[in-house]
Amino acid sequence: MQSFIIEGGHPLQGSIEPQGAKNEALEVICATLLTCEPVHIKNIPEILDVKNLILLLQDIGVKVTRLEHGSYIFQADDLNLDYLQSDEFVRKCSALRGSVLMIGPLLARFHRAVVAKPGGDKIGRRRLDTHFLGFGYLGATLGRVEGRDVFQLSAERLKGRYMLLDEASVTGTANIIMASVLAEGTTTIYNAACEPYIQQLCHMLNRMGAQISGIASNLLTIVGTDRLHGTEHTLLPDMIEVGSFIGMAAMVGHGIRINNVSVRNLGIIPDTFRRLGVKVEQHDDDLWIPYHDHYEVESFIDGTIMTIADAPWPGLTPDLLSVLLVVATQSKGSVLFHQKMFESRLFFTDKLIDMGAQIILCDPHRAVVVGHDHHIRLRAGRMTSPDIRAGIALLIAALSANGTSRIANIAQIDRGYEDIENRLNRLGAHIQRVDD
């Protein structure tokens, strides 16, 4: 186990570039299982979750060649399918939520897949029903393996059909798309997730020979094909990291430029920070966040308190609510945060309250923040990162606090942010990684 020691109060200044998108990486890396030909993927973030997924693919026989930092070639031409039945494979899947994205490609190409309860953040219930309902629509059957807490999906040949998803699940949509591209006939997916990373997956699959239309909408049509071929693909910058840097710049920045953010794929993220009073300027494809000695929360037109809530794309991603909440602790005004998707994600606010933040946790889904307007700084503390996004939010709080803080369980932060302490130290932060 490792921890961060953070000496707060040091202003950050300079330029920083976001890593490749974690969520897109997990999807497109699993999509390489759909072909026996080489697939070259660039701008891969070398973070813990992605590294573990790559190792898992290697375990089942995928040939992986690292050309340079973030640039890999994957070739799934000689897989050991018997390994899928092993206890070791099941154990590794259980520790890595991204492994669930292997199910669709394996089912499509090899007609069977093993399902273990996936790991990941401890942020409440994250059901997989949408995945299995979609596979069922395509003709797959789900059965429990006797004597083991695992399930097996199988199908002689998947067959396309119309389906209306019960929720616009991002991973569910990605999994069903990957299963459908090799299915017989036409698949129509209504209420599909349409995040930029889903769009990227669809574009990559089309370059591999798939026939997907309706990209960027919630109605996808997929005409199945017999085989896919290799391609080259470059990941988008990570919108969650971009949002994290905006929040960090607002709290402790003395002028920070975030380079090459792919502004058109950020959706309402910049405008949501602007609602908290944060100045976010667009310079071509870069964002400039000037020094803030003060920022004031907007109210709605009728004068009621600002409410910020997550929603499926093009709404606000739930992964940024933790960062926005921390930024609000030093705003002028009050704001209600409504986390609709996960019932445990706001529990980290207890740690912010210990640091002096004025937060009322109404229930597992809602919290009211009364901003200090920089009149009272947060105080340093000892804390533990419960998940990736709460971890980066606590790091931002510690950077702004009086004194020296310690954050334990930083493996959670490493799962989503590459080399974060060194990148921020180059901007002027004082962060040290230590063994517990």
Image (tube, rainbow, N blue to C red):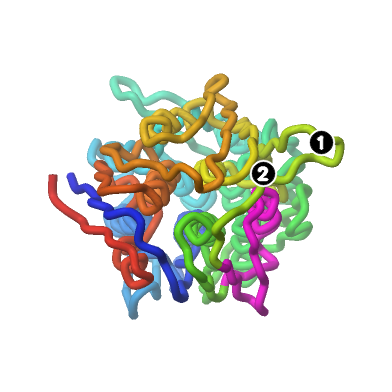
Query: Disc 1 designates what residue?
Result: 303
In the displayed image of the protein, which residue is found farthest to the right? Answer: 302
Query: Per the image, is 286 magenta?
Result: yes
Q: Which residues are magenta?
A: 261-290
Q: Quadrant of residue 420?
A: bottom left
Could you tell me which secondary element the residue under label 1 belongs to? loop
Q: Position of residue 255 (x, y in %)?
A: 51, 71
Residue contact at pointers 2 and 1, CB within 8 angstroms: no
Query: Disc 2 designates what residue?
Result: 159
Q: Earlier in the sequence, mark 2 or mark 1?
A: 2
Going by the image, does 137 lie left or right of 37? right
Which residue type does callout 1 highlight? Gly
Res 98 visible: no
Tell me which residue sits at (62%, 50%) in the image.
177
Which residue type does callout 2 highlight? Lys
Tell me which residue sits at (59%, 60%) in the image.
201
Task: Return the residue nearer the eye: 130 or 364.
Answer: 364
